[in-house]
Amino acid sequence: MKTNIILKKVSALIFLSGIMFFVNSCRKDECAYVNNCTTVVTENISTGLDAKGSAGVPGTSSTSWVMSAAPAPLVSGSVPLTLNPNPAWEPSPVAITNAGWINGVGTMFGGGSPVGNYTFERPINISAGTVSFSYNFKIAYDDTLVSLKLVRPDATFINLTATPATSYHLSAPVIGTIANPMSGTWKVVAVINLVDSVGGFITSGNVEKRIPCK
């Protein structure tokens, strides 16, 4: 007898739970739907790469980087060129990232680079709905670093710090995460000053974008 009563109570609870679930549930197109699933897309932002992400051939264009400002007679807005590194520099291509050195002429000698400030930019496209993106890269340069920034699509920026290691060798990692980023084109922007005709710049690392699952 007691067993039957217990079973009836359990059945009633199950029935009521089913009603509550039916009342509180809804189709995806009828009520607020939260998709907590995300995936990470990794983008190699290193200098000195070809179109396939392999190490570029010296004297050829460095894919995805732009030399937005440079001393005459070089043309601002042109694509920087990969070059063989000076023996005193960080060896390249760098393992894993394939990063290589770049400048405006693709060589160190035989005319070399005009002295002055060079601005190198690497665009990073962030789509609407991106949950966050993280950056993790290292840089090296010859001769001096004037500034290093992460520029937002609205032209405001975040100053970045690259702690030097041995001269002309890759710095400590530059690391950060941007939550709920503004959609549009972000940029890593480095300004390098050359005091003589032998100079270059290298970036080695990645950006990871966390986006909703499709």
Image (cartoon, rainbow, N blue to C red):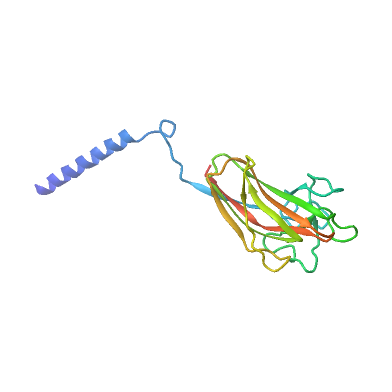
In the rendered image, the vertical position of residue 9 relative to residue 206, given as above or below: above
Horizontal placement of 192 versus 108: left or right?
Answer: left
In the rendered image, the vertical position of residue 23 relative to residue 110, given as above or below: above
Camera-side residue of 213 and 65: 65
- Can residue 62 be seen? no
Residue at position x 77%, y 52% in the image? 118
Horizontal and vertical percent position of residue 137: 64, 58
Horizontal placement of 157 versus 199: left or right?
Answer: left
Camera-side residue of 77 and 106: 77
Q: Which residue sits furthest right?
A: 110
Camera-side residue of 24 and 91: 91
Residue 138: image quadrant is bottom right
Residue at position x 63%, y 57% in the image? 161
Horizontal and vertical percent position of residue 45: 67, 53
- Numbered label tally: 0
- Can residue 149 be seen? yes
Camera-side residue of 212 and 106: 106
Horizontal placement of 35 versus 115: left or right?
Answer: left
Q: Which residue sits furthest left?
A: 1
Q: Which residue sits furthest top?
A: 30
Horizontal and vertical percent position of residue 7: 17, 45
Horizontal and vertical percent position of residue 20: 28, 36
Residue at position x 88%, y 61% in the image? 109
